[in-house]
Image (cartoon, rainbow, N blue to C red):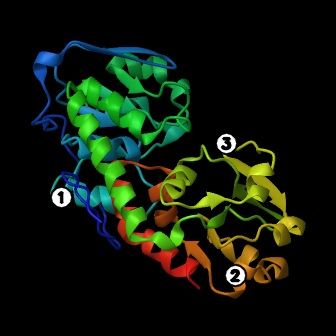
Amino acid sequence: MRVAGIMAAVLLVGTVVAGCASPETDSPSASANSDAHPVTTTGALGSATIDERPERVVALSWTDADILLSLGVTPVAIGKAPNESGVQPWTAESLGDSHPAILQGVNTNVSVEEVAAQAPDLIVATKSFGLDNQYSQLSELAPVVHYADTPSAETWQDATQTIAAALGISSQGDDVVAQTESAIDDAAAAHPALDGKTYAFFVGPQPDSTYVVNSTDDAGAKFLDQLGLTLTPFATAQPVSNIPGRAQISNELLADTDADLILATSSNGALESLEQQPAFQSLGAVERGAYVPLAPTQAQSIAFPSPPSLDWALDQVVPLLDSAVQR
């Protein structure tokens, strides 16, 4: 599946971003409209006024970088992704031959000095967890465009439109959102076996328990819902944990988690602890092969969505779900 006007991604193995954008190199924004400025955006932590078209944009998260790239703007620095190269595969494809600096600190560990070294005239942080700890310092460097409520509550649609407005290209942001949503709808139509099927999604298993997605407001759940899948009543009935959109259940409850499709992911290789549980092995979906273990990158493409990441997921994740649910 391909979203018109958005670069699709291919999986890069073992690639390390070798270069960094120097403070003398401006980030291109060919379609930004200087006549639209000044622009003011308002977020949970304050407002940001952008007086003129930004030339040196820093993205504090890889999701923010993805959105900028989908809008035709290459940031001079991007938040580090949790892989060897520090860049997600779909981001790498969108970057092409560009090599922005990779910010080594992420979330609460973002280094204000590291950002300052990039001489930014705009900082984008719609998905920057822990921004509240550094907002006042960062806003002294440049306007900080960020989330309206919390990073986890900010939808990719809202983030795209907010960032586009700050760049003076609101209509282009609307187009990117519409194109991406259309591509997801097309994928749902192309995979009718998913429609009406239930799923359970295990995240980060522990030795004695595991987290399950329990909210339809979860970013990944919204994507799966648009494909026609629905969370099980058992999952949505579980109380929320300290992680938004997640419930923590003991292994004793695994027998109650069966669905038409079972998904699971872990960033620390802990899936084995879940897969070895007799109750998990006895689930009907697991026994018939309707179980899809997702690699961290695959799960991140829908858990931290952006137009490029969702486009990548349509190619790299959806076919796996379609194949499994028909077993």
Disc on the earlier residue, 3 or 2: 3
Q: Amino acid at mark 3?
A: Pro
Identify the residue shown where x is 24% and y is 40%.
175
- Spatial CA span between label 2 and label 1: 40 Å
What residue do we see at 61% from left, 67% from top? 197
Would you say 265 lies left or right of 116 here? right
Please, what is the three-letter code of the amino acid marked with disc 1? Gly
Secondary structure at numbered mark 2: helix
SS assignment at label 3? loop
Q: Which residue is mark 1?
A: 96
Q: Counting residues from the N terminus, which is met first, the one under dot 2 or under dot 1? A: 1
Q: Residues within 10 Å of mark 2 (few under 14, many from 20)?
A: many
Q: Is residue 219 above or below residue 108?
A: below
Labelled pair 2, 1 in contact (Cβ < 8 Å)? no
| Foreground disc of the pair 2, 1 | 2
Q: Secondary structure at mark 1?
A: loop
Q: Earlier in the sequence, mark 1 or mark 3?
A: 1
- Residue 263 spot, x, y in % from top left: 62, 69
What type is the residue that disc 2 sits on? Val
